[in-house]
Image: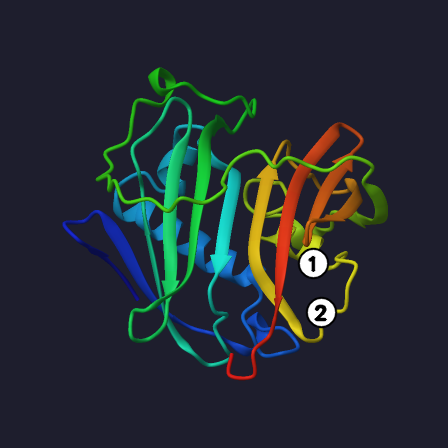
Amino acid sequence: MSELIQNNQKLSMDARVLSYQTDRNSLLKPSYALRLMQEAAAEHSDKCGYGTRMLYNKKMMFILIAVSINFDKMPFLNDDIFVETWSCRQNGLMFTRPGRIADKNRNTICCYSSKWVVVSTETRRILKPSETGGFAAVFCDEQFDLRDKKIPLPKDMRIVGEREIRYSDIDYNNHANNCAYADFVLDFIPCDMAEMRVDKLDIYFHSEALLGDKLKIFCKECDGKFYFKGEHERGVCFDAMVSLKKIEKNS
């Protein structure tokens, strides 16, 4: 169930951590944290009058450019959680959307920030504000000071594998859903994750991954962080950064 709160500036959504959303340690997978945030964003946009259906009727869609997420604590299997999101004012072509996941007592356990642009569904070209007609959104100035921008990659990254984009990766925008990239990254992380969890995750999108694309995944550890780059035949697809921490016994 979702509702608009704080004079319709924010959307809140109750959820529960389900079995298929968790990893081997019964903790919420980062990709499913992103899916919860994506669903809350879609609900918020729809309630504010510029949802997916309305945009598609105008041959427009939102595309994610960058996302950063900090996990102070990972939600556990069957935990009742609270997802909250809102829109900040547009800056040029970019829209900033922050949000958080909280526990049942409304204590923040995860915060995120993301950058979006509006593109044409036909040409995939980024649209200027004068071309979109504007949105009847209620904005909130609250933001999180995270890293939702281009990621400075280390030199001499080495290839660690290849990931083909399959049918199950594709969403209604006919490209790999942005949430799937968290799985792409963690599937190639060069360390034993048995007692580890994600602490911070950044993803920056350069271009779309389409059905049948074969992503070459590059990685390098630097200063305790794992940096990734994915390339397809058309060029760079995405960059990412992951930092880990040891799972505490009471997590």
**Depth check: 48 or 83 in front?**
83
Is the N terminus in the top left, top right, bottom left or bottom right quadrant? bottom left
Regarding residue 178, the answer to whether it shows in the image is no
Q: Residue furthest top?
A: 130
Q: Which mark is residue 137?
A: none
Q: Residues within 10 Å of mark 1 (few under 14, many from 20)?
A: some
Indicate left or right for 27 with 87 as reference.
Answer: right
Q: Quadrant of residue 129?
A: top left
Q: Looking at the picture, how far across and down is residue 248, in whole percent?
A: 56, 78
Depicted 152 relative to depicted 103: above or below: above
Say which residue appears at 54% left-offset and 62% top-offset. 32
Q: Looking at the picture, how far across and down is residue 54, in whole percent?
A: 35, 37
Indicate left or right for 24 with 82 as reference.
Answer: right
Looking at the image, tell me whether mark 1 or mark 2 is earlier in sequence order.
Answer: 1
**Depth check: 206 or 174 in front?**
206
Q: Looking at the picture, how far across and down is residue 65, in whole percent?
A: 53, 35
Q: Which structural element holds mark 2? A: loop
Q: Residues within 10 Å of mark 2 (few under 14, many from 20)?
A: some
- Callout 1, which amino acid? Leu
- Residue labelled with disc 1: 186
Say which residue appears at 37% left-offset and 47% top-offset. 144
**Depth check: 128 or 58 in front?**
128
State if disc 2 and disc 1 touch (CB < 8 Å).
yes
Q: Which structural element holds mark 1? A: helix
What scheme was used to colour the molecule? rainbow
Say which residue appears at 40% left-offset and 44% top-offset. 145
Regarding residue 70, the answer to whether it shows in the image is yes
Q: Residue furthest front?
A: 223
Q: CA distance from mark 1 to mark 2?
A: 9 Å
- Residue labelled with disc 2: 193
Q: Residue furthest bottom?
A: 249
Indicate left or right for 36 with 50 as reference.
Answer: right
